[in-house]
Image (tube, rainbow, N blue to C red):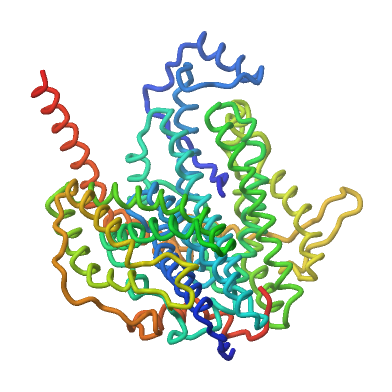
Amino acid sequence: MYTQALNQKDVAPATASAEDPERLARFEARVAAEDKIEPNDWMPEAYRRTLTRQISQHAHSEIVGMLPEGNWITRAPSLRRKAALLAKVQDEGGHGLYLYAAAETLGTSREALVEQLLSGRAKYSSIFNYPTLTWADIGAIGWLVDGAAIMNQIPLCRTSYGPYARAMVRVCKEESFHQRQGYEIMLTLARGTAEQKAMAQDALDRWWWPALMMFGPPDGESAHTDQSMRWKIKRFTNDALRQQFVDATVPQGHFLQLTFPDPELRFDEASGHWQYGAIDWEEFRQVLAGNGPCNRERLEARRKAHAEGAWVREAALAHAAKRRARRAAERQAAE
Amino acid sequence: MTSIAVAASPLVEALLARADDALVHAHRLSEWCGHAPMLEEDLALANVALDLLGQARSLYQYAAEVEGAGHGEDDLAYRRDAPQFRNALIFELPRGDFAETIARLFFSSAVMLPWWQAAMTSPDARIAAIAAKAEKEITYHLRHAGEWMIRLGDGTDESHARMAAAVAKLWPYTGELFAAEHETIAALLPDAAALRPAFEATVARVFAEAGLERPRAGWMQKGGRRGVHTEHLGHMLAVMQHLQRAYPGAVW
């Protein structure tokens, strides 16, 4: 996981309008020709800001995303499941690490980005503000949340910024593995006891709508997509990706013999697409505004880990400084 | 779900002891995942936990085969109660702060590296094969923990004080790691008492660089190897075994 189209407005500083038109034209021609933009290349400030925001939000989402699934590591029901879950959550940490590194190539340090997360200024994917209440939620997250993330992220493998595109290639490979793992958990539950099947259905009931919200607001309300599309930061609209996800996922759910919590869900022969009911965008706005069931807990957990780890990070720096000083003294003594 | 009764031969008991060490230690390390002092440690501690979990599984699988009662790795991990667990006490102590986590990983790796190295030449081919893999993993664990012992011991006043406290707290639990194996299987497994010089040399080398003092010989806590545990293991198993116990017979 997990980038999310949050479609935040780019708040440009007053001075940023004065881009050199010639450079801008060259830049846009390169992007149009599918050239990759690299860290040392000239780029418009708005491009840099948009990407820094998007990549760091994606990194934050990976890090916060470790928490809901981490909630079940100690309770995983078999040693095989435990190893797979631990490895998965570790993968997410790894994604966070190289996404922070990709964001740093745009000129903002990881420390500054983490500070934005901890202070509540930066956003992360809304989905992680929902709780994991049963083991089936681990299956549902893999199947639906990672499934939605893949839909979002596959196009990002071709995004115009080189370091982000390359990071996404690896992230997507791991995500599709996670998605299959999640579906396999759901399949095992759906073929299990009546209690396990009920657990799987309950998880689908709770995760389906939040998963659809992961693609962001509907295109009509999405004022900011145009420039990102032109700059090839974004390649498909929110609604197009959402539809692709629904079309791929509904038959998978039916194979599990589970019911989607949407009475209006039906296959439209004419368009060849699954039509779905109205999404509760008020819930989405509330979760983004900090009022989801777990927003406070998630941020508190991150802040607590950061605060409790401060003495460790300080010690590592102090030791490194002492070692440098000792080596310098040794060299001096030897001369 | 009812607990299983394990037909305990000396070899099964010895394999369970090492498997339980690894599983219980992995559990404590996995509690850090998402909560470590820095992202790199989230990854590193999860990595170590995964290695130990893998070792536990190999050992449980072999123990189940030797036992020959039709049990599998999950029966052994999820369907024994605390008194049937054979892990050394040091592994079940609560996670503690980062210094305690590192000190525990350091002490156990400093014992287990020579243990697995010796086990590589066991006449039991299965043990030798498990050892060949585990030895590589523990080499990394010891290096990682040793580097942190030095960083924290040498770093700031606070980190030094925390590490010294962790060492003082955990040292009395190191003695149990050297308990002798049953005489009938002594030829199959390393002689733990013979590992002491290697352990002491590692401790001396790392402590010297970390500016830490080795605690003096004193009373050693023990009991885990015969199923007499601390109060903490029961709580850990209540969490770990919850689903297997709550839904008897379900396949996950």
Closer to us: A227 or B144:
B144
Q: Report the residue that reaches farthest toward the left.
A: A333
- Where residue A217 sits in the image (x, y, percent)? 60, 49
Q: Report the residue that reaches farthest toward the right.
A: A269
- Where residue A122 sits in the image (x, y, percent)? 41, 46
Judge from the rendering whether residue A259 lies leftward or rightward of residue B101; answer left or right.
Answer: right
Judge from the rendering whether residue A247 lies leftward or rightward of residue A213; answer left or right.
Answer: right
Q: Report the residue that reaches farthest toward the top.
A: A22
Number of numbered labels in the structure image: 0
Closer to us: B214 or A270:
B214
Q: Is residue B233 above or below residue B148?
A: below
Residue B236, picture quadrant: bottom left
Q: Dividing the image into 4 quarters, which one contains the N terminus of chain B?
A: bottom right
Q: Is residue B60 above or below residue B140?
A: below
Residue A320, picture quadrant: top left
Judge from the rendering whether residue A258 lies leftward or rightward of residue A295; answer left or right.
Answer: right
Q: Would residue A273 be visible to someone looking at this image?
A: yes
Q: Dividing the image into 4 quarters, which one contains the C terminus of chain B?
A: bottom right
Closer to us: A46 or A40:
A40
Task: Name the residue rendered at 31%, 57% in the picture.
Answer: B106
- Where residue A4 sits in the image (x, y, percent)? 56, 47
Q: Is residue A36 above or below residue B75?
A: above
Task: Name the residue rendered at 43%, 55% in the picture.
Answer: B117
Q: Would residue A287 be visible to someone looking at this image?
A: no
Q: Is residue A217 above or below residue A68?
A: above
- Where residue B26 sits in the image (x, y, percent)? 44, 65
